Amino acid sequence: MTASRAQRAVGFRAGHAAAPTWQRAVDLALERLGAVPAGGNLGFVYVADRFAGDCAALLATLRARTRVADWIGSVGIGVLGTGTEYLDEPAVAIMIGSLPAGEFCVFSGRARAPALGARTASGADAAHFAIVHGDPGTPDMPDLVQDMSAKLSSGYLVGGLSSGRERAFQLANEVLEGGLSGVVLSSRIELTTRLTQGCTPISGPHTVTAGARNLLVTLDGRPALDVLRAAVATTLGGDLRRAARFLHVGLPVAGSDTGDYLVRNLVGIDPQHKLVAIGAEVQPGMPILFCRRDGTSARVDLRRMLDAIAADLDGPPQGGLYFSCLGRGASMFGSGSAELGMIHERLGTFPLAGFFCNGEISHDRLYGYTGVLVLFK
């Protein structure tokens, strides 16, 4: 998805660091960031959950040190800076952008976003695109994501759910819990975004011909377990028990022009009745895929996504945000910040910030096991 090309954002800088205290981490991150870009007016900050209790003081310090008033961000078990992944480390990642004045609005449950159809002083759509963070403890989060999508002229929001061992905070000019918060951007701000699934379909789509609750009874008129065994026989050597740790179910997204699907866990099988249990409710007539999720599949799909987003750029990105599932990173791509390394190898080095999420948001859906990249052009 690409926003209007009428106006570029004019500059981003980023810094990141790990340190025993939040004060030292902020000092080092700001030192790496260097001078705040001319006209810098929107900050993004991602804070390791070890510093979660210090978010209010950290936010006040950033405001005082940078003179940037508007900030959004999240707490995460891991945070991402330009070329570097900090997973389970005390770290902070910061990015500051200089965007056209009056063309963005920080929102939360305490501060309203622009209404659909509203115009900025420049005449642009005020509510065009949103970058958001959410609380994983909010039970109706998928509905909130869809509702927010309907309030944007592009229909697109991107972001992730906060992650933390105890409390998972969001930041949107204050420290928050619950619901969604973030920033709404006008149609004058030029950007592009893509999603990488991290899986490869190995069978399907199949049609659920009988099923209830989370149980697949028959697919394409055949016992569900027989269909699964056939998929494993042709792609994973036929050993269902050995292959189980790689197997997932994909639920195709209706109307997607890029073949997107929601990945859900394979919960269990019943050999006697040839049933398959999955981590989602099923209904007769719905399509499903069987998918393989491993390092090879994740790298292949990330390269596909990077090629697609590169084709939408007419030069190096000015800045970017990356929202990656907690199950990705080193466990999927290897050590040495390999996942971010692939991004910068394909697109070049540019300011970037983000975090490891407890669920990723793209367009109008809440995903899992994915990576969502958004670039300011």
Image (spheres, rainbow, N blue to C red):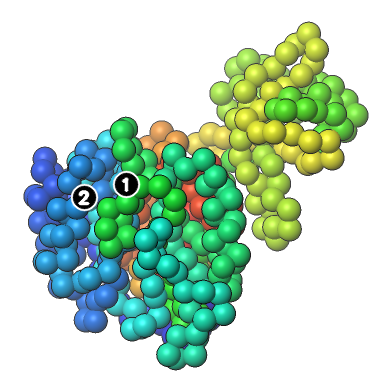
- Number of labels in the image equals 2
108 is higher (above) or lower (below) than 229: below
Q: Is residue 99 visible?
A: yes
State how far apart marks 1 and 2 are (Cα). Answer: 8 Å
Dot 2, how many residues are within 10 Å of its Cα: few (below 14), some (14-19), or many (20+)? many
Residue, far bottom: 122
- Give the residue at x 28% y 62%: 173
Horizontally, residue 270 falls left or right of residue 334, namely right
Task: Name the element at disc 2.
Answer: helix
Residue 64 is drawn in which quadrant? bottom left
Q: Are marks 1 and 2 in contact (CB under 8 Å)?
A: yes
Q: Quadrant of the N terminus?
A: bottom right
Question: Where is residue 151 drawn, in percent x and y?
Answer: 56, 67
Question: Where is residue 328 drawn, in percent x and y?
Answer: 44, 39
Residue, far top: 272
Horizontally, residue 295 falls left or right of residue 97, namely right
Q: Quadrant of the C terminus?
A: bottom left
Question: Where is residue 336 drawn, in percent x and y?
Answer: 31, 42
Type of amino acid under label 2: Cys
Horizontally, residue 255 falls left or right of residue 161, namely right
66 is higher (above) or lower (below) than 27: below
- Give the residue at x 55% y 70%: 152
Type of amino acid under label 1: Phe
Task: Name the element at disc 1.
Answer: loop
Q: Earlier in the sequence, mark 1 or mark 2?
A: 2
Q: Is residue 2 visible?
A: no
Dot 1, how many residues are within 10 Å of its Cα: few (below 14), some (14-19), or many (20+)? many
281 is higher (above) or lower (below) than 65: above
Which label sits on residue 169? Answer: 1
Residue of label 2: 55
Closer to the camera, 292 or 364?
A: 364
- Give the residue at x 77% y 27%: 212
